[in-house]
Image: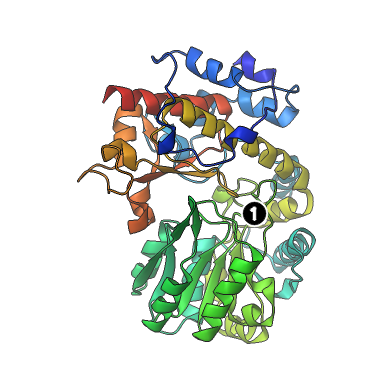
Amino acid sequence: MLFFHLVQSFHVSALTGAVGGDSGTRKRPGGGGSLQWWREALFRYNFASVMNSFAAIADQTTADELRARGSQKWSKGGPGVIGAFVAEMDFGVAPPIEAALLEVIKRAEFGYLSQRAVDGMAAACAAWQRDRYGWDVDPGRVHPLPDVITGLSAAIRVFSRPGSPVILPTPAYMPFLTVPASLGREVIQVPMAGDGGRYVLDLDGIDAAFKRGGHLLILCNPSNPVGRVYSRAELAAVAEVVAANGGRVFADEIHAPLLYPGGTHIPYASLGEVTAAHTVTGTAASKGWNLPGLKCAQLVLSNDADEATWAEHGSTFEHGASTPGVHASTAAYLGGGPWLADAVAYLDGSRAFLAGLLAESLPEVGYRPPEGTYLAWLDCRDLFANGDRTAAPAAGVSPAEFFLAKARVLLTDGAACGEAGRGYVRLNFATPRPILAEIVRRMADAVSGR
């Protein structure tokens, strides 16, 4: 562990492209289960400076400490299993958020959520949207939710045509496939297209889905699980399709704070009057500042008609946003920027570090470092299809089940993200780098020994 306390940054330019099956000539050094493997992998990089406090604290955090926290990520798999599935970080809490929560405790503010607290959060969220993304949001149109999935339910029930199908580009966040079905709605999956290994939205497929009767498009940006951050031109092209079909959009922008160098988040509703008129936006501080258990998100409305509809039908969806969560979110938006910058810098290094580990030890696994989020979308089809990347995995073989059973690593099965995700796994790399290295070591050993 002390090795990690001495270093902070490394040159990663060679790792920023896709890593995949064309790397078959690269062999894993050594093998076996010792720590020597990941130490050798780390020394291949040119370390340039001493770690800052955030990185040092992150890399000192042990698996035992994380298990002791008792979160789902570290308890669901059972003893000895490393959780890398659910989207939460292992990096603790930003000091302004900790201070805000301590104040809540000091005041014993555990009653029902007050309008004063909601107004403070709405103003803070609006200021963040304005200052960070250039989107001028009316704080009066920012509403509390327990989570973004509740926002999706509201968008379906309040703003979409009754009984109409929901349109979903896939691979997609798992509840986006299940929540509409639970509300009696068909989900029209529109697989994303490949563009040089980079996922792009299939505009023709989305248009066809609208023409089949779909009315609400779920647009996740940054995209979970594939990590795309859509450009202004891409979003404008989506807007043309939606407007031509009289559709609506639920814009899930919960991962917007987690962008890497070169990326720019453009709120879809901010493109202009057309998108403002047909968009309902869901966002939260929960991913950027690791607050999912505090149950607070925001629904941002961008036109008068939707605000009037919400005033009549939306109040029940606001129940469940917690008082501590609202105060924590306010603190994140107002004072959490420096901590977030440190977290993103660490994650930026980790996404490239993961690329190097996979190239060394699992060259059959395809991986393109995400443009946003801390989620790695791993193409495992070569591991189960005898090297044929165009083939589906062998019948009955789930990469996630394989790695849980053989490597004691709990991942998200790509099939849960839609038909387009079969043969993939989603790996959460928002964990200390020694643990990330151990995850890949276990996976590589499982593949070598199966």
Q: Residue at x 70, y 68 (%)?
A: 115
Q: Which of these two is toward me, 337 or 439?
A: 439
Q: Is residue 114 left or right of residue 416?
A: right
Query: Would you place residue 397 above or below residue 133 in this image?
Result: above
Q: Can you say which quadrant of the picture contains the N terminus? A: top right
Q: Position of residue 421 (x, y in %)?
A: 37, 52
Q: Quadrant of residue 145?
A: bottom right
Q: Residue at x 64, y 82 (%)?
A: 274
Question: What residue did someone put label 1 on?
Answer: 285
Q: Is residue 181 left or right of residue 374?
A: left
Q: Position of residue 414 (x, y in %)?
A: 37, 49
Whether residue 92 appears in this view of the structure is no
Q: Is residue 362 left or right of residue 44?
A: left
Query: Would you place residue 418 above or below residue 74 in this image?
Result: below
Q: For the residue carrying disc 1, how many other residues have a C-alpha within 10 Å: few (<14), some (14-19), or many (20+)? A: many
Q: Quadrant of residue 231?
A: bottom right
Type of amino acid under label 1? Ala
Q: Can you say which quadrant of the picture contains the C terminus? A: top left
